[in-house]
Amino acid sequence: MEAKTWKNPVIAWIDDRLPVFSMMQAELVDYPTPKNLNYWWNFGSLAGIVLVIMIATGIMLAMQYTAHVDYAFESVERIMRDVNYGWLLRYLHTNGGSMFFIVVYIHFFRGMYYGSYRAPRELLWIIGVFILLAMMATSFMGYVLPWGQMSFWGATVITNLFSAIPLVGEAIVTWLWGGFSVDNPTLNRFFALHYLLPFIIFALVFVHLWALHVKKSNNPLGIDVKGPQDTLPFTPYYTIKDTFGLGVFMIVYLAFVFFAPDFFGEPDNYIKANPMQTPPHIVPEWYFLPYYAILRAITFDIWFVSAKLIGVILMFASILILLFLPWLDRSPVRSAKFRPIYKQLFWVFFADCIILGVVGGNAPEGAWVPIGQAATFYYFAHFLIIIPLLGKFEKTRTPPTSISAAVTHGGIGTKVKEAAE
């Protein structure tokens, strides 16, 4: 990193001893960014902004929350009614969790569409999957803290799943509970972990950005930058674009906060937890519903393996399989823009994920059972069968020679080799 001469003597003195300003100049101002990034690239920065909002509101809420089964529900009600702007902090936090998953899911699907997981960005993608896993753990533990009916029974059902693991399952459940049922020790450790994990996510995001700035951003064409003619400085071009995206996002986010604050929530969670009364239908938060559908898809034992254990394995495998996506996809072309069959099947996969979410939100009975099984089969077939086969047999189109060439006459692979002739 080249040393920069600063006019301000204080900044120059600090930068000479700790070149933080030079680093910010290089990574946030002069950073060469592909000139053809579209608005789908806004969601990475939006995710970072939401993370900061979640940490800030979470710290403020933790100052007023009481992690005890006798007082947790009442302390949340006190935050809503008696703490100055407590209602705003809580609604920003609860709806912020849903907004966080929305922007991260869009960020993931964008990466899959444009091939951002392909070499040399495999590690960048893998770190992103670990961020998603940490987000899931954090949100699950946060869902337990209000100590409503859905909090208590959701924690009971989900933690009980680990009992299906042979030999160590019961010990894991006992450790998670801190005893022999979901009770005060469970609430205490979930509160501690819910407070800690966002800082782990923050550290993972830092490493994620580090990996991004080493191998640079992908772009809609999925081709490598060939030189300075293909890039623009990050500031002011993309800071302005990100600011516009942030403005649109905040309109949507705050519309939920002020006008529909309970849109993503469950009414049962406004009833204090009662271990003696089970809700008629226990469901997790909406962003877990596809995985919940996969968990319940298998209704029969296979040899000596119970349906419960198979469901748990498939649920975790549905996320962990993303770690291997860079090696499952062997296509010579990254972006779906030049992969006609993959582009169509990508949208089929997207629809399959929506179907899984709908199935997860309904009771496992009637037609929902075979629909969930079929959608689960397609989910894994997409990664393990379709993508590897497409990498071998799909007839791809020819990408342009460079980003700059794409906007010149005949640049898009000479009209994509005249539509592949």
Image (cartoon, helix red, strand yellow):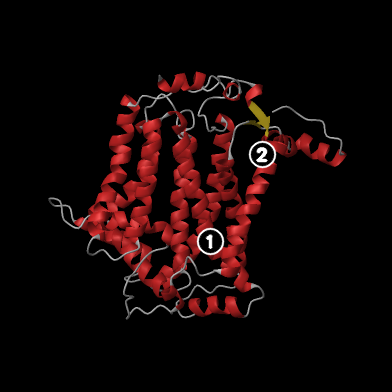
Name the foreground residue: 158 vs 9: 158
State whether residue 24 appears in this view.
Answer: no
Q: Give the residue at x 55% y 42%.
A: 40
Q: Give the residue at x 44% y 38%.
A: 112
Q: Give the residue at x 32% y 52%.
A: 315
Name the disc covering residue 285, or none: none
Is 66 drawn above or below residue 20 in the view shown? below
Between the residue at mark 1 and the residue at mark 2, the CA separation in whole angstroms equals 32 Å
Label 2 is placed on what type of residue? Tyr
Q: Nearer the viewer, mark 1 or mark 2?
A: 2
Is 376 drawn above or below residue 288 in the view shown? above
Name the foreground residue: 94 vs 15: 94
Is 64 drawn above or below residue 57 in the view shown? below
Residue identifier under label 1:
195
Q: Answer left or right for 303 relative to 178.
A: left
Q: Position of residue 251 (x, y in %)?
A: 62, 58
Q: Residues within 10 Å of mark 1 (few under 14, many from 20)?
A: some
Name the foreground residue: 213 vs 290: 290
Residue identifier under label 2:
238
Q: Position of residue 412 (x, y in %)?
A: 52, 23
Is 332 drawn above or below residue 318 in the view shown? above
N-terminal of the pair, mark 1 or mark 2, is: 1
The single residue placed furthest to the left in the displayed view is: 303
